[in-house]
Image: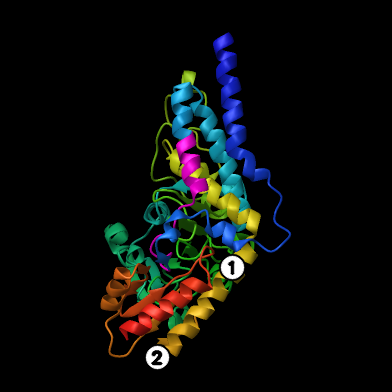
Amino acid sequence: MVIGKAVRGASRSYHRIMATSVDTPRATTAPDWASIRSDYPALENWTYLNSATFGQMSRRSVDAAAQHFAHRDELACADFLDWYDDMDRLRASIATLIHARADDIAFVINAAQGLSIVASGIDWKPGDEILTLADEFPNYLYMPALVERFGVKFVEAPWESLLDAVTPRTRLVALSEVNYATGFRVPVAELSKKLRERGVILFVDGTQSLGALQFDCSTAKPGAFVVHGYKWMLSPTGAGFLYVDPELRAKLPPTTVGWRSDKTWRSVDQLHHGAPRLKDSAEKYEGGGLPVPLLYAMEQSVNMMLEVGPAVIEARVLELAGKAREILRGLGATCEETGAQIVTAKLEGHDPSKLATALRAKRVLVAARHGFLRVSPHLYNNEADLETLRTELSALL
């Protein structure tokens, strides 16, 4: 009994520490961007303008994962069920961030897994169609490998004619909110409304947007929304989530089953044997154990974003993106206004891959994608970073 009390006491103390920032009041004054920046050690040595490739990890997130591993040693994993309580806490925080309910959130290891859950769970009929945007991220262009065995037709269309490409056989439209190569931002709420009127499921990938841009599931109303947090959510690779609308959830079966599929899975002393009795919540799509160290790290990033405020972050990131466009145009580049935080530039007579490589040698990190030089500032960047980009790129040109 004494040992049991000690375990429970240590566990409660640890989980209170991990949850501390959840109850922090939301900021009512302008953020101290310099203080936020100081929590990202990579920025001490690099001019990092490449969050569309990888977001940087904060000390706060790294410490949360390290604390979890230390806690495992302290209690020898005796409190492992409590970890799942913490994951439910993160579920609720993510739901707050995207204006949903905790029951709508399932954890996934990447966006491809989330897409596969939805695309593999639909009751396809031969001749049904999946529609995506032309020049999408490969996850979406590779969908035929997943569904063609069902006799499903795969269709690509440019944004201007996307709705014209919807037919009575279109079952699913799947696309990114922000295109990884061009920075084009889809007006999701407008598209979702028109697709719902036609009975078409909309799957949205927010990996290249959420964390920098706001997303409101209550107004956008996608059927599903997936985010792999390693980019703009400033989280480790392998930490992600899938929102599934309750209406879709009611008819979308899980494609993975495991020991957590039955709704009584927490009764580990007497696990249910037989066909799993599924929950109504999105948790039913998880199946097995979760990457809890990665999710503890993600939780700290989500909490920081809620503390600062998603609208405040979006305004700051779009401000920096606008200044980056001005700088690039001043150097002779062609930059489209996309409404997003990813800045893409064409520099006549210059190979963007060679420019990105040369800038990297100067410790300035940007990217090259499909003929564009891609610059992607986040909340931890500042005007000095953009001036460094101007100086180094000007010297190359």
Residue 99 location, x and y as percent?
A: 63, 57
Residue 250 seen by the camera: no
Q: Residue at x 39, y 46 (%)?
A: 255
Disc 2 target residue: 332
Q: Does 115 sit above or below residue 173? A: above
Whichever of labels 2 and 1 marks the residue nearer the N terminus, that label is 1
Closer-to-camera residue (8/353):
353
Residue positioned most to the top: 1
Distance CA(mark 2)–CA(mark 1): 27 Å
Nearer to us in this view, 60 or 227:
60
Q: Nearer the viewer, residue 362 or 229?
A: 362
Q: Which residues are magenta?
A: 49-67
Name the disc covering residue 314, or none.
Answer: 1
Amino acid type of the residue that numbered disc 2 sits on in the rendered structure: Gly
Mark 1, secondary structure of its residue: helix
In reply to whether residue 59 is colored magenta, the answer given is yes
Of the 4 image quadrants, the one containing the C terminus is: bottom left
Measuring 58% from the left and 20% from the top, which residue is drawn there?
8
Q: Quadrant of residue 379?
A: bottom right
- Say whether residue 49 is left or right of residue 362: right
**Picture coordinates of residue 76 (x, y %)?**
44, 22
The disc placed on residue 224 is none
Residue 72: x %, y % from top left: 45, 28
Q: Are marks 2 and 1 in contact (CB under 8 Å)?
A: no
Q: Badge 2 local density, few (<14 within 10 Å), some, or many (20+)? A: some
Which tag is nearer the camera, tag 2 or tag 1? 2
Amino acid at pointer 1: Glu
Q: Residue at x 42, y 57 (%)?
A: 42
